[in-house]
Amino acid sequence: MPMSHQSSDHPITLIGVPLDLGAKNLGVNIGPEAFRHQNIVTKLRKSGLSLSDSGNIAVGDRTELDPGLPNLRYLDEIVRVNTKLAAQTEAAITSGHKVVVIGGDHSVNLGAMSGASASQNGNIGLIYFDAHGDMNTADTTLSGNIHGMHLASLMGFGAPELAHVHGEQTKLATDQLLHVGGSDWDQAELDLIKRENLHAFTLFDLLTQGLGGLITAIDELNSRVPAIWISLDLDCIDQIYAPGAGMPNAKGMTYREIATVAEYIGHHCNVIGVDVVEYNPLQDQLGKTAELGIELIAKFLGHNYSWYTGYMDQNQL
Ligand SMILES: [Mn+2]
């Protein structure tokens, strides 16, 4: 692990997406404002990133919307918001920026990745941290929640309305996904993984192979793609460290695992953007989950912000 501070010349565009229509539990819609309240902009700038806040993409209120089809709840609004997010993300990357997207539920990854993919003509890797597969389709979903389907959509599976956000092309090649930290799978997702030979480095793999196995998987993907998007569902992290995840996880990755992997990725991969999703401030404890999210964003982008860097800032002569 190189200790050198890798500086990034790319300015960062921050986009908030207060979308909670992809899930049923309330609270993740105030994620972007809670991250700002936690001073995400100041803290990421302190880490050395040149960051500007583009504000939020406006999202309709669930009380005023018709959920529509039971197996694709709030499809129209989710497609509309993600189409906007995709355009903003592509424009930012094309103009030389990197992008940080703050959710919102995980369905915002559909727009973020679709825009990032378009900026790279589809040649992009995705490292996707999540306790869940998010690979259902309208035909297999048990909940109708789109935050459990968008990853399949990015690879061209499922409802065309989702798969065709920001163009009909496939956004993510099946061999350019690395799913990390999965522990709660639906049978249909396991079937898709098997059928399409997807790479899922599960929590079981992490426990049995250790971090070395995960680093090998990251290196392997990184060697084949010119650019990588990171999607971080906070529910992949143990609830001790991330109580404010939409679905708190009693058997998630530890702080030292996720922080070390984020730092490794930041130093070794060409990360062009990060989304941090499923933050529920109503479940957080003293903002510690947001604080961890900010730290991980800095690390994924090759910089550092942590309790330790803050401590050293306050104690310099
Ligand atoms: Mn997810």
Image (spheres, grey):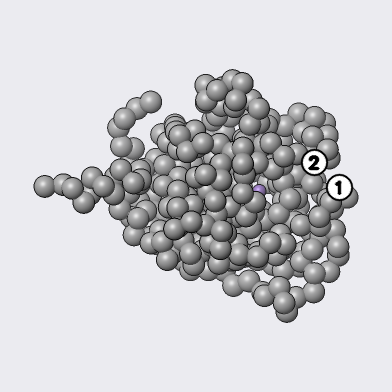
Looking at the image, residue 95 lies above or below residue 177: below
Provide the residue designation for mark 1.
140
Q: Nearer the viewer, residue 26 or 45?
A: 26
Q: Residue at x 83, y 69 (%)?
A: 68
**Which of these two is toward me, 167 or 102?**
102
Circle 1 sits in a helix, a strand or a loop, which is it? loop
Residue name at image x 37 percent, y 53 percent: 44
Of callouts 2 and 1, the N-terminal one: 1
- Which residue is at a point 86% across and 65% down the rendered structure image? 69
Q: Residues within 10 Å of mark 2 (few under 14, many from 20)?
A: some
Kindly tell me whether residue 272 is visible in this rendering: no
* Residue type, label 2: Asp
Q: Is residue 296 above or below residue 100?
A: above
Q: Is residue 226 visible?
A: yes
Decide if residue 59 is on the left or right side of residue 99: right
Name the side, left or right, on which 301 lies relative to 146.
left
Q: Nearer the viewer, residue 230 or 83?
A: 230
Q: Nearer the viewer, mark 2 or mark 1?
A: 2
The quadrant holding residue 65 is bottom right
Q: Residue at x 45, y 45 (%)?
A: 296
Residue furthest out toward the right: 139
Element under disc 2: loop
**Residue 29 in the image: x percent, y percent?**
60, 66
- Tell me how far mark 2 sits from mark 1, CA to CA: 9 Å
Q: Name the residue beneath numbered marker 2.
A: 186
Name the outermost residue toward the left. Answer: 317
* Image location of residue 218, percent across then percent down: 55, 29
Q: Position of residue 266 (x, y in %)?
A: 43, 38
Mark 2 touches mark 1? (CB < 8 Å):
yes
Which residue type does callout 1 highlight?
Answer: Thr
